[in-house]
Amino acid sequence: MDDDLWALIEPLLPPWPEKAPGPRPVPDRMRLQGILYVLHNDVAWQLLPLELGFGSGQTCWQRLGRWQKAGVFDRLHRVLLAEIDAAGELDWSRACVDGSHVRAKKGS
C-alpha cells in the first residue's frame, strides 16, 4: 500500500484504546495489509503467514470486525469515490442505485 492511499485511510481508523491489555499491537497499516492479503489471496485467516509481519490472522480478523463496526469501510468508500470523482475518473452515467444503498420512499 502506497503512502498516498495510507494517508487517506489512516484518519478514518478509530484510535487504539490507551489502556488496552497485552503487548503493543501491530500497527494498523500492517494489519490492513494483512487483511488485504487474506482477501486478495483467498486464504483462510489462520493461514496468514506470520513471517510477512502482519501479525496473526486471528488478530487481523478481529481488527477487521472492529473497523467494520466503527463504520470505517463505509467512510472509506465515500472518501475514495470523492477522490476518484475529483480526478475526473468517475463515470456517474454507469452508476446504479438500489434499495440496499438508498432508502426507497413508500407510496407516491
Image (cartoon, grey):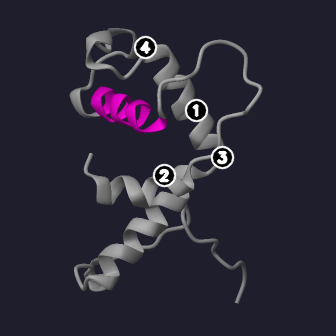
Residue matched to label 1:
65
Give amino acid for label 3: Ala
Name the residue at 58% across, 42% down: 68
Mark found first going from the N terminus, 3 or 2: 2
Name the residue at 71% across, 78% down: 106
Mark 1 Cα within 10 Å, few/some/many (few <14, many 20+)? few
Which stretch did the figure color magenta? Answer: 28-39
Which residue is the extreme one toward the bottom? 108
**In magenta stretch: residue 69:** no
Mark 4 Cα within 10 Å, few/some/many (few <14, many 20+)? many
Name the residue nearer the viewer: 57 or 98: 57
Quick one: SS at disc 3?
loop
Residue matched to label 2:
10
Spatial CA distance of label 1 from label 4 is 14 Å
Spatial CA distance of label 3 from label 1 is 9 Å
Mark found first going from the N terminus, 3 or 1: 1
Residue 82 tag number: none
Give amino acid for label 2: Glu
Residue matched to label 4:
56
Mark found first going from the N terminus, 1 or 4: 4
**How many discs appear?**
4
Give amino acid for label 1: Gly
Spatial CA distance of label 3 from label 2 is 13 Å
Side of 1 where 78 appears, left or right: right
Residue 96 visible in the current orientation: no
Residue 11 visible in the current orientation: yes
Spatial CA distance of label 4 from label 2 is 21 Å
Residue matched to label 3:
70
Which quadrant, please, contains the N terminus? top left
Name the front one of labels 4 and 2. Answer: 2
